[in-house]
């Protein structure tokens, strides 16, 4: 077990959580779970997720119980959407703020190594198996999240698992999955994504593409599946590296794909190139119904595996903040920071992807400048690295005295240290996708690179900031603690 994974677990746990259920138990002990009873699967679950996530900066996760028409079934939303729950997920010490988790993630990545899963003969996911005519997806409380969605979506907080037909490695990514009927689902995968590349390899060879759809799993697996892990590395292995020990997987009956042994619900089937139905629209992470209905390949579900009283995982994209955006900002920031350092960029003091930019469109790097051109180099790498490239828009570099998580601080730096004609550059024809409301049919958009640092050649004579020194702030805060506590 990796050293930093072996310790911590918020200082209370000497091992990783076994599964989703144990994670929920731990999170509830930390006061991080909100129980909601009696919600209707039709729109009410999505509306409640919007109410909760728009009310607080780091909202609690929602455990839906006694869902209308589905006694004994439950669903969970927003498990990794706070600093505390994300630290619990990843095995980090208790954070003081979001940047603590970003820093811990970046430090982890300095020695992170993927750990492949262990194949076992059985697991809780095999407690119930539907085969053939017994398959009924409406057995589960599949929600209709938004008023204008094209249907009910079982796959939002999910893993779509495929095996690359050439390299043999397993991809486990998050793609939206719409229920067409009791035995059929549609999967929408954005152009350029690894799952789309794998799917098209099967189709080009004239073969069906075997797929598993996992709908309820360890939140660490969802974190890995929801981010840009490099091509050829399995997200299950990647998550195992963060866990410090391998996940257990069970081979599926039909296609032998690895499914997490403790998953709540897993669907198995195959995609066929000539078998498509109209999918969408769906309210997406950008905050818009961003992709028009289109013909997408369907999966005829051949098997459904599920635990007793399964817990369906839900992610509710909407106008931000959403039930995944805060956690996504933290992990995305850590990944960009790691990639920048691996590319040789020194002096990075912090990275933050803002929720208002849906964790992709407004990214800020705090930098201690060391040489002329340092800020521009950081801008180019941050905008072009794997974790920062997809559906980007604005990349901003600020000095190390600016808190990248504080939008007011960032805008102040942009307003006072950026000369628009000298310090804003543009890069054209960058990778975007259909979920970007500004993207044309080419799925390409431009990037704005904003240097909001003091000019390097004026570092010595640039006006000083009018602010009390940190030591004075701390001393006065201690002296007037009662007053400060009331603010």
Image (cartoon, grey):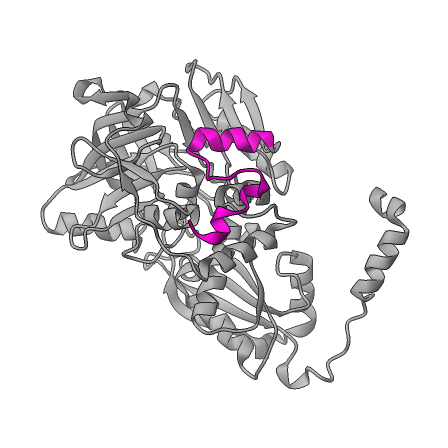
Q: Residue at x 30, y 28 (%)?
A: 123
In the rendered image, residue 429, in percent from the top left (x then y), is placed at: 37, 67
Magenta stretch: includes residue 433: no
In the rendered image, residue 352, in percent from the top left (x then y), is placed at: 56, 58
Q: Residue at x 40, y 49 (%)?
A: 435
Is residue 487 visible in the rendered image? The answer is no
In the rendered image, residue 256, in percent from the top left (x then y), is placed at: 18, 37
Q: In this rendered view, identify the residue nearer to me: 424 or 66.
A: 66
Q: Check the image and report above or below for 254 versus 208.
A: above
Judged from this view, the residue extending furthest toward the left is 206
Q: In this rendered view, identify the residue nearer to me: 372 or 185.
A: 372
Is residue 418 visible in the rendered image? The answer is yes
Q: In this rendered view, identify the residue nearer to me: 312 or 391.
A: 312
Residue range highlighted in magenta = 1-29
Direction from residue 54 to residue 335 in the image, left or right: left
Residue 143: quadrant of the picture? top left
Judged from this view, the residue extending furthest toward the bottom is 457
Q: In this rendered view, identify the residue nearer to me: 235 or 184.
A: 235
Q: Residue at x 30, y 44 (%)?
A: 117
Q: Check the image and report above or below for 27 versus 237.
A: above
Q: How many marks?
A: 0
Magenta stretch: includes residue 8: yes
In the rendered image, residue 149, in percent from the top left (x then y), is placed at: 40, 33
Residue 455: quadrant of the picture? bottom right
Q: Quadrant of the C terminus?
A: top right
Q: Check the image and report above or below for 422 versus 325.
A: below
């Amino acid at each position: 077990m990796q050293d930093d994974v072996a310790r911590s677990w918020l200082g209370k746990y000497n091992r990783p959580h076994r599964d989703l259920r144990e994670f929920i138990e731990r999170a509830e002990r930390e006061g991080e779970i909100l129980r909601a009873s009696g919600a209707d699967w039709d729109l009410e679950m999505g509306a409640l997720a919007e109410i909760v996530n728009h009310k607080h900066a780091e909202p609690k996760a929602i455990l839906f119980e006694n869902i209308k028409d589905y006694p004994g079934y439950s669903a969970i939303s927003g498990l990794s959407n706070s600093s505390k729950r994300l630290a619990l997920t990843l095995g980090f010490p208790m954070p003081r703020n979001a940047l603590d988790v970003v820093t811990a993630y970046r430090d982890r990545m300095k020695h992170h190594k993927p750990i492949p899963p262990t194949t076992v003969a059985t697991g809780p996911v095999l407690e119930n198996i539907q085969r053939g005519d017994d398959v009924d997806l409406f057995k589960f409380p599949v929600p209709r999240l938004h008023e204008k969605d094209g249907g009910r979506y079982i796959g939002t907080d999910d893993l779509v698992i495929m095996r690359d037909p050439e390299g043999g490695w397993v991809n486990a990514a998050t793609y939206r999955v719409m229920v067409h009927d009791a035995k059929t689902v549609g999967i929408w995968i954005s152009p350029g994504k690894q799952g789309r590349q794998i799917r098209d390899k099967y189709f080009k060879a004239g073969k069906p593409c075997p797929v598993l759809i996992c709908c309820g799993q360890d939140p660490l697996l969802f974190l890995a599946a929801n981010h840009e892990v490099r091509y050829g590395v399995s997200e299950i292995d990647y998550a195992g590296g963060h866990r410090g020990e391998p996940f257990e997987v069970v081979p599926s009956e039909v296609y032998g794909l690895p499914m997490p042994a403790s998953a709540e619900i897993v669907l198995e089937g195959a995609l066929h190139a000539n078998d498509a139905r109209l999918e969408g629209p769906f309210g997406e992470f950008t905050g818009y119904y961003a992709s028009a209905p289109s013909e997408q390949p369907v999966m005829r579900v051949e098997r459904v595996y599920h635990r007793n009283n399964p817990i369906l995982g839900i992610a509710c994209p909407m106008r931000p903040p959403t039930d995944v955006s805060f956690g996504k900002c933290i992990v995305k920031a850590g990944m960009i920071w790691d990639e920048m350092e691996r590319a040789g960029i020194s002096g990075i003091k912090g990275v933050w992807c803002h929720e208002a930019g849906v964790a992709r469109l407004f990214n800020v790097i705090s930098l201690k400048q060391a040489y002329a051109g340092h800020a521009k180099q950081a801008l180019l790498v941050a905008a072009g690295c794997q974790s920062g490239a997809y559906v980007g828009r604005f990349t901003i570099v600020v000095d190390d005295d600016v808190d990248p998580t504080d939008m007011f601080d960032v805008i102040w730096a942009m307003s006072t240290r950026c000369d628009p004609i000298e310090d804003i550059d543009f890069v054209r024809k960058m990778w975007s996708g259909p979920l970007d409301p500004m993207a044309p049919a080419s799925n390409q958009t431009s990037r704005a690179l904003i240097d909001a640092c003091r000019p390097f050649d004026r570092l010595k004579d640039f006006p000083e900031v009018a602010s009390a020194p940190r030591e004075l702030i701390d001393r006065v805060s201690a002296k007037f603690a009662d007053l400060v506590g009331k603010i």
